[in-house]
Image: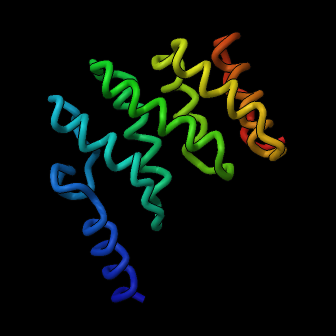
Amino acid sequence: MERARQRMADDYRGAMPPWFANDLGWPKLKDASQIDLAIEFLEHDPWFNESGYFKEHLATRLKQAELSQDQINRLQDVVLRAVAGKSRREFRDYWRLARKLDDERLRRGIEELSKRPDPATRRHVARLLRVLNQGGTLPKLWP
């Protein structure tokens, strides 16, 4: 059992970006290059044990970061891809981040997604719009 736990921890460390803090601490997004690496991680959307927790935390840190317009555009694409995908752990943090990213470009992307016939995507769109339009408490992820 201990060997399995150690292997999982090693796999987890191996999946993290090189700037990730030692001892599995949370990253500090201090400069544009670290912000870009965090965005790149979200763009690649790796899926492994506890990756959702890591993505949640990155979204929270990115919400607090000073972002360039290019970084905003890239994060908007991450949010839109998430809205078009399956319900996952990091959704609520992506919605919180979307409040910071809200502009005409994001709204156009959401409008395009609202035209898709997939009921899950349409449900995600409705929830994201509720968050953007009303602010306040985030809706539950699952009904």
Colour mapping: rainbow
Vertically, is 5 above or below 97?
below
Q: Please give left or right for residue 115 compared with residue 40 in the image.
A: right
Q: Please give left or right for residue 118 compared with residue 77 in the image.
A: right
**Quadrant in the picture for the N terminus:** bottom left
Between 143 and 113, the one lying in front of the other is 113
| Residue at the (47%, 63%) spot, across then down | 47
Vertically, is 33 above or below 5?
above
| Residue 117 placement (x, y as % from top left) | 83, 43
**Quadrant in the picture for the C terminus:** top right
| Residue at the (53%, 34%) spot, across then down | 94
| Residue 51 placement (x, y as % from top left) | 45, 57
| Residue 128 placement (x, y as % from top left) | 67, 27
Quadrant hosting residue 16: bottom left
Between 61 and 130, the one lying in front of the other is 130
| Residue 17 placement (x, y as % from top left) | 23, 55
| Residue at the (60%, 35%) spot, across then down | 92
